[in-house]
Amino acid sequence: MKVEIDQSGKVEQTNKNTILCLSNDNWDAIIIKAKTKRQLQEIFRRHGQIRNFIIFTFSSLLAILIKRNLHLGKITIDQEYFGKEKIIMNKAVEDVWNTARYYKTNLRMGAYIVALKRMLM
């Protein structure tokens, strides 16, 4: 089954909430409040990583949606950040890996990561 992910309210628009929505036969969504985005942005700024704020925040939201919907097939992400797709995919897979590694054996995790990459490509 093909699933699409779309974003409403870009991450960099810190005066608006951001919603990441997964849709097809089933749907799921995650929201990050504008206030939370401003707090995250300040943390990135304090650590000299302001350029990573948008990509890391978006990919983390994406990872949460993927973790909640692992049973789905191929995922298509709307092109919100042109030229950054590979970075977003790798960061999302890394986030899922870091969470899931506590629950699965290393052998299973190898297959798990391969499956995630196939979903996102």
Image (cartoon, rainbow, N blue to C red):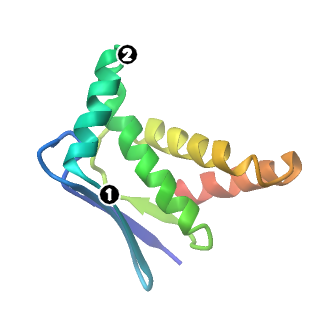
Give the mark count. 2
Q: Looking at the image, do the residues carrying marks 1 and 2 touch, with CB atoms under 8 Å apart?
A: no
Where does residue 44 sit, x and y in percent of width and height? 34, 24
Q: Earlier in the sequence, mark 1 or mark 2?
A: 2
At x 29% / y 20%, what residue is drawn? 45
Question: Which residue is labeled 1 in the image?
Answer: 78
Q: Which residue lies furthest to the top in this view?
A: 48
Q: Residue 47 carries which label?
A: 2
Q: Which residue lies furthest to the left in this view?
A: 15
Residue 46 makes an appearance in the image: yes
Where does residue 81 sit, x and y in percent of width and height? 29, 42
In which quarter of the view is residue 28 placed?
Answer: bottom left
> Is label 1 in a helix, a strand or a loop?
loop
Where does residue 14 sit, x and y in percent of width and height? 17, 41
At x 60% / y 49%, what residue is drawn? 96
Residue 90 horizontal side relative to residue 97, left or right? left
Q: In this view, does 43 lie above or below 12?
A: above
- Mark 1, Cα crowd under 10 Å, few <14 / some 14-19 / many 20+, is few
> Is label 2 in a helix, a strand or a loop?
loop
Residue type at mark 1: give it.
Asp
Where does residue 24 sit, x and y in percent of width and height? 40, 80
Mark 1 vs mark 2: give the one in front: 2
Residue 51 makes an appearance in the image: no
At x 26% / y 41%, what residue is drawn? 37
- Mark 2, Cα crowd under 10 Å, few <14 / some 14-19 / many 20+, is few
At x 45% / y 46%, what residue is drawn? 60
Q: Residue furthest bottom?
A: 25
Residue type at mark 2: give it.
His
Q: Which of 36 and 11 is in front in this view?
A: 36
Q: In this view, does 52 lie above or below 61?
A: above
